Image (cartoon, rainbow, N blue to C red):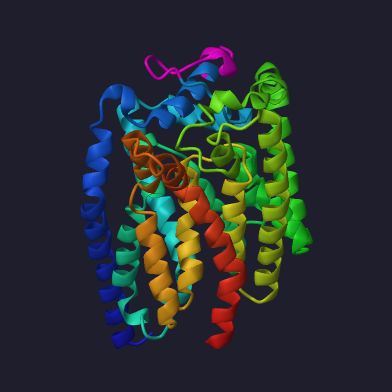
Amino acid sequence: MTRGEVRVNRRQWWTWAIVALAVAAAVAPLVHTWLTNPDDQRLVDLDVYRTGGQMLLEGRPVYAAYTPAPQLLPFTYPPVAAMLAVVLAVMSWETAQWVWTAGIYVTLAVTVWFSFRQVLKGEAVRRYAPWVFGLLMVACAYLMPIRDQVRFGQVDILLVSLCVADCLARRPWWPRGFLIGLATAVKLTPGVFLIYLLVTRQWRTFWMAAFVTAVLTLLPFAVIPQDAADFWFSALLDPERLGANAATTNQSMRGMLIRLYMNETVESAIWLVLVAVVGWFGFRGARDAHRAGDPLAAVALVGLMAVLLSPVAWIHHLAWIVVVLGAIVGDGRDRVRLRVAGGVWLYYVVPVPWWGVALIAAGIPGVSLVLGKIVQNGFGLGALVLVWLLVSWLPKRRELA
């Protein structure tokens, strides 16, 4: 390595350090807002995770416990997640908040890197890659699903980063499929990637992911058998443990249908039809994107399937929007794709569903109810539009490049 190359590398490291400080300063208002919330509103999901770990340490039933009043939230994750949460339980509450919040931004950085790697590695941007990366980090940090990661102390962006790294790392040092298996065992919904691996015939990765999922699912039956039985044969079958399914924050297709207040049988039948149709369309699109050499678009589509097909998908589950934005941007040379990505970013920065709630409350005859319901479902309907964009529109833009 020449002296000139050494100087460039040192300058790059200093640049990355400055960018890291700039990103920290930019997200500081978000962190301050949510970490100074009243005690009963601060990182409530992190409190759920710690409660699960505390129950194991104290030898008490995990799925019979609730966080302190007034939240009274139950532990809803598979038993292996409670085992992993013991690490959080041995920390003080204050330490856990800071460690978890820092982890959210670290895993967001991993997700942003893999999602926008084509841009960051491009010749036109490479020299300014640290600054572009910092700008992308801040832009993604202010997306509402990512803001909610910090607000609630959620685990979603960690699971997104595991699946993204597993699918998109060029030469992983771990067995490919291991991270998908870990994510699936912790929260089930990443199991959609097992379907993706099947339809794309990535057999070795599929078997590794399935093996890890199975081992981490069966392990609790040997270590905490009663809790494992409580989850798989009781808690898992009660969707109301996750919260009010009709709440605005549930932006899955089922959540949107529930808010129409139809006959339950009719609603279930429509939902099953939609799951079949959207699932077929989305996984077929992911398979085609994989075959076309665009694994990023494939991963983005599978992430959207995790949200839309799930019975319950809160707004923070839409952390997959980061990957979707990266897939739309591509290598950054298509200005049309950049403008579309900008529009998608803005749409998921503002609290669209809550505007719908305000419209319904306004009670304007002939307008409020219909328009309000549509806007209230805005993020879920937007996810459906994004599926169409990635399956039908994006391939045409790739052909024009």
Q: Does the magenta stretch include residue 358?
A: no
Determine whether 388 is above or below 77 in the image. Answer: below
Q: What's the residue at 54%, 30% (across, down)? A: 245
- Image location of residue 341, percent across then percent down: 42, 68
Give the number of marks.
Answer: 0
Q: Is residue 68 shown in magenta? A: yes
Q: Which residue is drawn at 66% across and 59% down?
A: 282
Does 70 sit above or below residue 346?
Answer: above
Q: Position of residue 185 (x, y in %)?
A: 64, 39
Q: Can you tell which quarter of the image residue 6 is in?
A: bottom left
Q: Nearer the viewer, residue 258 or 351?
A: 258
Residue in the foreground of this view, choosing between 227 and 393: 393
Residue stretch in magenta: 57-72
In this picture, residue 90 sits left or right of residue 33 = right
Residue at the spot 33% in from the left edge and 51% down from the top edge = 350
| In the image: residue 64, left or right of residue 228 | left
Residue 249 can be seen in this image: yes
Which one is in front, 253 or 375?
375
Q: Is residue 250 above or below residue 401?
A: above
Magenta span: predominant SS is: loop
